[in-house]
Amino acid sequence: MKFMLMMNAPRGDGDYGVKDWSEQDFKAHIGFMKTLNQDLKAEGVFVGGEGLAPPGQARLVRAGKGGAPEVTDGPFAEAKEFLAGYWILDVDSPEQAYAIAARISAAPGPGGRPMNMAVEVRQVMSAPSV
Amino acid sequence: MTDIVGFSEHLLRELAPQVLGAVVRKQGDFAAAEDAVQEALIVAASKWPHEGVPDNPRAWLIQVAHRRLLDNVRAEAARRRRETDLLAEEQDAHLPAPDSDHEPEREDTLLLLFMCCHPALTRSSAVALTLRAVGGLTTAEIARAFLVPEATMAQRISRAKQLIKKSGESFRMPSALERDERLEAVLHVLYLIFNEGYTSSGSSLARVDLSSEAIRLTRAVQQLLPEDAEVAGLLALMLLTDARRAARSDAEGELIPLDRQDRSLWDQQAIQFGVELISRTLSRGEIGSYQLQAAIAALHDEAARAEDTDWPQILGLYGLLLRITENNPMVRLNHAVAAAMVQGPNAGLALLAPLAEDPRTANHHRLFAVRAHLLERAGDLAAAVRDYHAAAERTTSTPERNYLLLSAKRCRH
């Protein structure tokens, strides 16, 4: 069964909370994410995943008159957290997805302490089982 | 074994445009011929490593492609016969027998490139079609290189061919004026392929090396048009840029800027070839933007240490480039960097001021990144941090974002 894991990162006083981190902490965080992705591939569960561009570039689009795009700035100006990236994983059980979500959530933050980011876990709809 | 696989893969990519050119010439229908050649290449890729490469691989591929085309035409005719009673044999009569072997038409590769870079196509379609029809890559390889599903890439290529068909483009050399425009489009597409390969980090072994493919194709065009100064300029630019590849990122994939690269990792052979090519070309006197960019790359590559870089000459070349590109804002940014290296950071900052008013650059991450760098050099660290952050919030490249954030952190120490 497939799950989408959406990682919500704290926004800080700009687009990135990481702005205030020390160089060492930031490098540790980058290294953690790289290793995590390699591990998920090695474990045979990684289907896909991407990091998303900063929320300041997000736009909300609705069909306007005649179907023309009506574009407004994203809804994130006031938000404390933003969607920083997502994974799609193919696992055997929801518990396995939760365990991986917990690994993501524990990514190191300032001082190497776990960030405890909120990771939203959603099952991907599939064909009915036979 | 891997040697044979590598050898026949290389051979197939070299032969692809020649075979396609020959089949289109006889059959006329680019879209159908391109499908048939792709099928023939796939057959060869699975057969040759085991059974050996045939004596005349080009004739072999042409024959297999013709047979595939015939099968496809028959299947199509059979479908139509049910409605219109059309005889498949009649169709066969129109298909000439594959000839033994004659000199490949010299201009076929060029005609195919013009076709693939048709103005009706989007850039991403032209890139994909060029890699398949002229580069001889399979749809699966192209899809992997651009990290999209194979079905998506197959659809993109097939739509591109439909658009070309609809445009009524015929397989012959366009008029002189149109030819120049098309060549410009071809060079741009080759440049995009190179850039995609150069800027995509985390090179995986499963991915085709797009930079090398772009260099190979540009070299082929340069051999066809040895007199064209911009073709030579583009080839030199690619070689001189690609020569620094090994030094461009660290083990973790983070970017290393030019002035901090380990220059002993640069490919001296590629540099020598590129410098010779661009020197020879510039001495002929028809200057273009690819040549100027190559000349600038050559000056960077020739400096044994970053502090040996001939910035005054680079500044002069950016001045020329500004004139040719009619003050292209991205060129103005680089011009400001060069001015800062020659006349100090404040001279560079003064040149950036108008770009903050230009709507094309006012919100561009490159403007903030360059200004941050110059502010840091000028000693205004607080302003530099602000601009590094602003740049990081605007770039869409992860390694670049990380580099900018780390630069900001360095300023705070």
Image: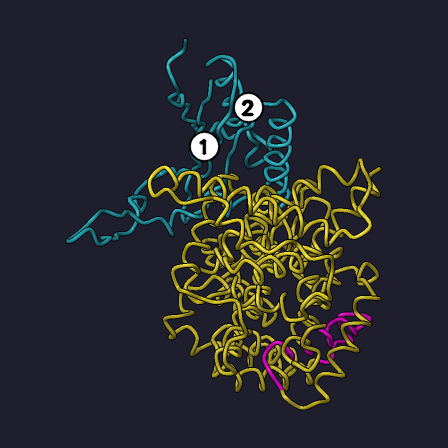
Chain colours: A cyan, B yellow
- The residue furthest top is A130
Q: Which residue is mark 1?
A: A7
How far apart are labels 1 and 2 at the CA level?
11 Å
Q: Is residue A15 magenta?
A: no
Q: What is the secondary structure assignment of the residue under circle 2? A: helix
Q: Nearer the viewer, residue B384 or B324?
A: B324
Residue occupying the point 43% across, 59% down: B165
Q: Which residue is mark 2?
A: A103
- The residue furthest bottom is B285
Q: Nearer the viewer, residue B106 or B5?
A: B106
Q: Is residue B294 magenta?
A: yes
Kindly identify the amino acid type of the residue bearing the numbered disc 2.
Arg
Q: What is the secondary structure assignment of the residue under circle 1? A: strand
Q: Nearer the viewer, residue B129 or B321?
A: B129
User: Chain for mark 1?
Assistant: A
What secondary structure do most residues of the magenta stretch adopt?
A: helix
Kindly identify the amino acid type of the residue bearing the numbered disc 1.
Met
